Amino acid sequence: MNLHERLAQVKINWEQLAEKDSKLEIFGAAQHAYKFFKPFVKDELEAGEKHFKIALPEQYKEYLQHVSNGGIGPYYGMYPLQHSLYPLGEKYLQEHPEHYSKTFPFTNNEVTKFRKEYSQDSSYCLTIPVNTGGYLFLAEYGCGGYYILILNGECKGQVWYLFTDVEPQDDSQIYALYPQFVNGTDKPIDFLTWIEDYIEYYLFDGNFIPNPEIPFTNPEQIKNLVITNKNINTLPDHLYQCENVEYLKINSCHLTQIDGRIKNFKKLKVLDLFFNDVEELPEELGRLVDLEEVYLKTNSLTQLPKSIGNLKKLKVLDVSFNSIHDLPESFSELKNLQNFYHSSLSEEVVAILQFKLPNLAQEKIARTVLSDQAALVNLLKKVSAKLPTNHTTIKCM
């Protein structure tokens, strides 16, 4: 498809996603509510380019004219062009009219280097002073994170991630930068691909499920299953037909049971059951030999299945905020475990664990504590709901 055909399809797909997410359940959707803003008139847009001495990347410029100037968009929605520096302050553009026309300071060679360094060290990032120009803000991700569009230089047209909440260096405020790439490649992502990938992710059946009871037309094609904030005690039968699932996330769904049919997910790599009411995991869990990450935080578990030792590829395990005080003997078989989070194991059990798994460094066995008020409120609500009716009520402020 040519550019205009792609833009027309993007607009159709936005409308389809708005219909699918009619209750605004996708993260950030309640903010933009899938509203299209009035597109830019070509003459007005070109006058703005001339005034600020820039040439906008073609894909972005055409999107502003033929789809929407802000509003509907990824995460919390897209900034209108006239507000595309709003995160820097309302008066920033008046005080720095040269921001757009400044040369963005990084090259494609540095992007390639970033890709290599980041794959070896996830703390690696690029940095810029706050007064660096040559980009605009596309959308807010939250918690100090934004997606930006590079306006000039070798990286023109690329979408990067910018993080503002960084400790100053030498009394100079800096931002952290993370180039973004097309999934599964080393190719930097451009504006329209960034939009298309976001929409298609949520339009794909398994990545966002408004109604878990509705079966899939082609369950064998589902790779991700993501269900959040639903009221389901057990998984609907049809979900167990998705035998090629690699990522299963069921969060905050009041789930109480996972039965032996979990063995059907024989390609599963990540299992995330955060904030449910699961009391027991079946021994069939041990058949999922490709599992690399398991997140069981905030459930009602008292023990792990003996078969957990079969998960030889397991790298991350989080059992914090359960009632697990001991571990099965087979736990010592998890030789590839790199990070283990708990909240109720005794120092004696941890010491034994370190002895049996010497490759699991001490700092990688973390006792989880409640670090924010929202988590505390949620946990207290959950505990309070399970108390006998004659028990003193726990109040959440």
Image: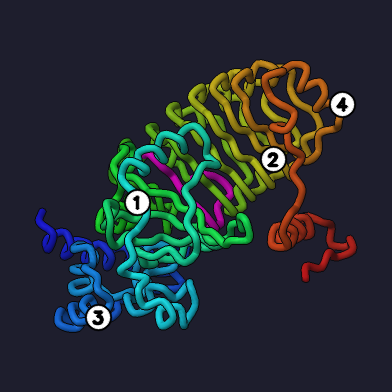
| Secondary structure mostly seen in the magenta stretch | loop
Closer-to-camera residue (137/130): 130
> Mark 4 sits on what residue?
348
Q: Residue at x 32, y 75 (%)?
A: 81
Span of residues in magenta: 223-235
> Amino acid type of disc 4?
Glu
Q: Is residue 134 visible?
A: yes
The answer to which quarter of the image holds residue 217 is: top left
Residue 389 screen position, x and y as percent: 84, 62
* Quadrant showing the C terminus: bottom right
- Disc 4/disc 3 C-alpha distance (Å): 69 Å
State if disc 3 and disc 4 touch (CB < 8 Å): no
> Mark 3 sits on what residue?
51
Mark 3 neighbour density, 10 Å: few (under 14) some (14–19) many (20 or more)? few
> Mark 2 sits on what residue?
279
Is 89 on the left-hand or right-hand side of 352? left
State if disc 3 and disc 1 touch (CB < 8 Å): no
Which circle, 4 or 3, is nearer the viewer? Answer: 3
Q: Secondary structure at mark 4?
A: helix
The earlier-in-sequence mark between 1 and 3 is: 3
Q: Is residue 228 magenta?
A: yes
Which circle, 1 or 2, is nearer the viewer? Answer: 1
- Disc 1/disc 2 C-alpha distance (Å): 32 Å
- Disc 4/disc 1 C-alpha distance (Å): 45 Å
> Mark 1 sits on what residue?
201
> Amino acid type of disc 2?
Glu
Q: Secondary structure at mark 3?
A: helix
State whether residue 260 is above or below residue 6.
above
State whether residue 237 is above or below residue 162.
above
Q: Residue at x 52, y 39 (%)?
A: 122
Q: Residue at x 72, y 33 (%)?
A: 363
Q: Secondary structure at mark 1?
A: helix
